[in-house]
Amino acid sequence: MTTITSDARFLGLDLRALWAEVRQAWAYVQRRPPLVWLNPVVPVRLLQADGGESLWRGEARLDGAAVGSVKALLVAIELPDDLVLRLAWSLPAVSDADIPDAIALHAQSVSPFPEADLAWGYRLHSGGAGAVADIALASRRQIDRYVQAQATRLTGSLTPEIWVVHPAAVPIVMQGFGESARYVQAARGRLMRYFFVATACALLAAIAITPSLQLRLRALDAYAAHEALTRNTAPQVVQREALMKTVEGLTALAEIHAARIEPMRVLDKLTRVLPDDTALQNFLIKEHKVTITGLTANASALMQVLSEQKGVRDVRAPSPAVRSGGDAKENFTIEFMVDPLVYGVTLPAPAPASGEPAAVATAAQPAASAASGGKP
């Protein structure tokens, strides 16, 4: 049968013991520099057994000018020596958390007072090979009677603490009286200091990350502005793309027209330069290449004439001229390249605006007559 235990364990670790050790280590660290200031020390006004008063902060007695600058709301009463039993006890090897229980058990075992009437307190100090506790024992009934006798010296409604001043001037606090109020105030002050430290750390962290946050916010704003601009300019972008496509088409068309040879201009040129004894039988234009075949009296002279024309180059005969039968003329085939700048397609000039002389439109047209050899 499976048994259910209430032990708080994780992966074999006793979480309660671990937490107790962590608290113990943290409490020890707080009692040492530089974190000792996290533990506030509450001032206490001590009503001494000899009728005087003194001001204490922790285990230190304030004297001189320091007394007037500190205000103590808590009160402690010093027990006279005739009401206190003192003893020193060498502690066994126990943890710090078990020290109060060990001292309470030892006090009950050595006390001459009944358990219900026993009041005790202790102070630890090192001595010899181990820790030594200075223990103070007293009767609760005697303490109550003494406190009632000191009622005229008490002010306020708080229950006074009961102290036994050690000969070494370090007080021993008797357990179970008004010391809880001091512990509460100390805990409250410690929490306030924790809060201030946490606030300071949060402010420092905020100061450290503020530039990064500002940069992120600026980036987000810039991104939002870019998105808004993109949405607002979407129609214009579409129109621009359409315009660019149109421009590209017009550019391609212009290139095609610029590279296209106008056959009529080539024929007009040939009509002007070919001698009267030459007859064309075939005329072919492929891109910038012109091929002509026909009959002429002298094919070599014809090639020489064509080579001298502006815009004509690479004149050659792919096959030799041949005379057929008793014919006095030669059958020729001649190829040559023409310049599109001279024999290309010329777009019409725009019509002149109203009021302008017709000579403006005439001057805008390309010089076709110059391409044809200067003849009218």
Image (cartoon, rainbow, N blue to C red):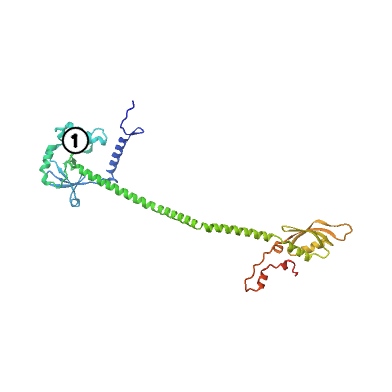
Q: Residue furthest front?
A: 354
Nearer to us in this view, 281 or 172 = 281
Query: x, y percentage for residue 317?
Result: 79, 57
The image quadrant that residue 239 belongs to is bottom right
Q: Residue at x 24, y 45 (%)?
A: 186
Residue 50 seen in the current view: no
Nearer to us in this view, 219 or 178 = 219
Quadrant where the N terminus sits is top left
Image side of residue 271 versus residue 256, left or right: right
Q: Residue at x 61, y 58 (%)?
A: 248
Residue position for label 1: 88
Q: Residue furthest top?
A: 1
Nearer to us in this view, 121 or 333 = 333
Q: Residue at x 30, y 35 (%)?
A: 16
Quadrant where the C terminus sits is bottom right
Q: Would you call the spot at circle 1 few (<14 residues within 10 Å), some (14-19), or many (20 or more)?
A: few
Query: x, y percentage for residue 41?
Result: 23, 46
Q: Residue furthest right?
A: 326
Residue 192 seen in the current view: yes
The image quadrant that residue 85 belongs to is top left
The image quadrant that residue 178 belongs to is top left
Query: x, y percentage for residue 100?
Result: 22, 36
| Secondary structure under the numbered disc 1 in the rendered image | strand
Image side of residue 313 versus residue 173, left or right: right
Amino acid type indicated by mark 1: Ala
* Numbered-mark total: 1
Q: Residue at x 48, y 55 (%)?
A: 227
Look at the picture and state if 128 lies above or below 349: above
